[in-house]
Image (spheres, coloured by chain):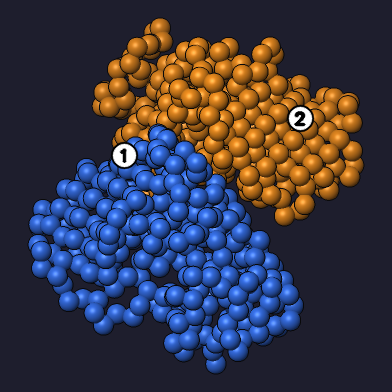
Chain colours: A orange, B blue
């Protein structure tokens, strides 16, 4: 029997990804939504999660699609009410609040799933397997997109805590930390802040790898035209390119065929959530978020031209 | 028989605190030092830790007193060479590098001790015990000092990764996270950066407490006159003040006598390090550093007047 799930925050990411994935999932039925301004036809709708949890006893799990700045309160509410919780990326505004949720879920014996959807892109597992036995010389991330196209009017991304270009950039970091065979840490970061915004529009990162590889990343939100979500890799066994945000992988210029039959990122996330609930586990790897916090902590800031939509 | 210990970084904090504490400790003998420009009379001196470790086989532990930006390399070197490691606060420049050291120490079966000296101030344990059963209404940290007096000429504190006013402020956060009966997380932060420096000179923090208390902190590095390192507390059982950086505690205006017979902060740290080695444990609570990273991540930045020494 499918789990009865509630969605909190019926915005762009919920409509584009979560609702279709739940619809297609054998593991979940959409039982209710909580959102200030939006609803889903035919499904009980509430203005806030507290009302939903009170009215819908049979909702056993909650998927939070709200912006990270407001996610903690709802996650805590759901866990306190005995519900399993799935978090969109990034799992919260601060590392400390997510740690608090991790401790609470453990104390309550509930599943907490901090998702990183890009890790479920079709070719990520293949890239990870290929890298595992290579001597890596160089890895360079180019993660560049047009914020006006991909985040139209989303003002929260420019507000303190909204992460700016690290909102897409954390996807790259979630893939990097998944495929890289060793722990990395930032040795240098340059963050460019528009003079009228609280979050950066671009960043250049350099990582230290105890294995000696050069590991770098460039994030840019003012990139015109089609997005570039690429990871270029040079090894003792030649070059490889993980591109389209992890969807395709090419070795020495030859695309592999792996991935074509893979489920989409979000169907894969919901399948994993069902597994975690079934086995009584949580999954809460914070390493992508920790790299972002490290970049804000050690990064040099420069001020650039104002950003207007 | 005492452990043979090496000090890395013979600077102000080593001379003021570590060397006297080791000198007075029954658990440690100073066997060697590694420092670019300084030495300690009568003790073998090396320019770098690699040479020291190679030459001094009997050195079983290393205490790192260098600035946080350069601490990782030496900590890794010492752990790789099978030595126990003690880290000054903060334990590193990034959370990710410290996590890497934690994992390495665990893999090697060595002790890693990330110290927070202010937690060993004379009255901190008393304040913690008193708070444990109180309903807290309000806690306010005032941590204000004159950077020119306390950090004369230490340019690294103004460089990216040097933390600025969070270098003393993290002491307050180490006490807060020790005495507070619940987990806290930042809900708001304002950071003031001198226009010619990479790190903040002042900060105002507001924490969220699931218990409902108002928890705030004000850090200021341009405070003239005697320093103020105070934590004001209001509870259902009256007010209390933990002052002088944790050295004295007063309830309802009446100083307690606890603490007068306590060992100093650094003797207490070295006693703890010896205990950890003896019991094969590590101690690496990163919560103060996590709050700082959170403040840099979610904080609003304002630019203030240039800072000159």
Q: Residue at x 58, y 76 (%)?
A: B7
In this view, the mark in front (2 or 1): 2
Q: Residues within 10 Å of mark 2 (few under 14, many from 20)?
A: many
SS class, disc 1:
helix
Question: What is the chain identity of the residue bearing mark 2?
Answer: A
Q: Is B229 on the left-hand or right-hand side of A192?
A: left
Q: Is A196 on the left-hand or right-hand side of A74?
A: right
Front-lying residue, B90 or A56: B90
Q: Residues within 10 Å of mark 1 (few under 14, many from 20)?
A: some
- Answer whether labels 2 and 1 touch (C-beta < 8 Å): no
Report which residue position mark 1 lands on: A80
Front-lying residue, A207 or A271: A207
**Res. A277 mark:** none
Q: Do labels 2 and 1 share a chain?
A: yes
**Where's residue B278, x and y in %?**
51, 81
- Residue A9, quarter of picture: top left
**On screen, residue A22 above or below B105:** above
- Residue A38, quarter of picture: top left
Report which residue position mark 2 lands on: A242
**Where's residue A79, x and y in %?**
36, 38
Asked whether residue B62 is in view, the answer is no
Q: Residue at x 50, y 66 (%)?
A: B88
Alpha carbon separation for disc pair 2 and 1: 40 Å
- Residue that protrudes farthest toward the top in the picture: A41
Q: Which residue is drawn at 61% across and 32% down?
A: A203
**Where's residue B53, x and y in %?**
70, 76
**On screen, residue A79 above or below A109:** above
Q: In which quarter of the image is the N terminus of chain B?
A: bottom right
Question: What is the chain identity of the residue bearing mark 1?
Answer: A
């Amino acid at each position: 029997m499918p789990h009865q799930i509630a969605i909190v925050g019926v915005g762009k990411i919920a409509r584009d990804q979560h609702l279709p994935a739940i619809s297609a999932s054998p593991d979940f039925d959409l039982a209710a939504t909580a959102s200030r301004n939006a609803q889903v036809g035919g499904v009980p709708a509430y203005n806030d999660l507290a009302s939903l949890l009170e009215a819908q006893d049979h909702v056993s799990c909650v998927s939070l699609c709200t912006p990270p700045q407001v996610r903690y309160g709802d996650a805590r509410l759901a866990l306190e009410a005995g519900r399993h919780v799935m978090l969109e990326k990034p799992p919260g505004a601060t590392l400390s609040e997510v740690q608090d949720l991790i401790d609470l879920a453990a104390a309550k014996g509930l599943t907490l799933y901090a998702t990183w959807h890009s890790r479920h892109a079709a070719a990520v597992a293949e890239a990870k397997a290929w890298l595992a036995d290579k001597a890596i010389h160089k890895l360079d991330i180019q993660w560049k997109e047009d914020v006006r196209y991909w985040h139209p009017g989303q003002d929260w991304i420019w507000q303190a805590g909204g992460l700016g270009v690290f909102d897409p950039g954390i996807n790259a970091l979630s893939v990097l930390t998944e495929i890289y065979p060793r722990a990395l840490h930032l040795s240098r970061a340059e963050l460019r802040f528009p003079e009228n915004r609280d979050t950066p529009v671009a960043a250049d990162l350099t990582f230290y790898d105890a294995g000696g590889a050069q590991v770098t990343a460039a994030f840019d939100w003012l990139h015109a035209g089609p997005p570039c979500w690429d990871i270029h890799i040079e090894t003792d066994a030649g070059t490889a390119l993980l591109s389209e945000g992890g969807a395709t992988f090419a070795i020495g210029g030859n695309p592999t065929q792996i991935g074509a039959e893979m489920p989409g990122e979000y169907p894969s996330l919901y399948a994993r959530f069902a597994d975690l609930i079934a086995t009584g586990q949580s999954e809460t790897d914070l390493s992508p978020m920790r790299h972002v916090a490290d970049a804000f902590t050690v990064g040099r800031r420069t001020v650039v031209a104002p950003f207007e939509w």
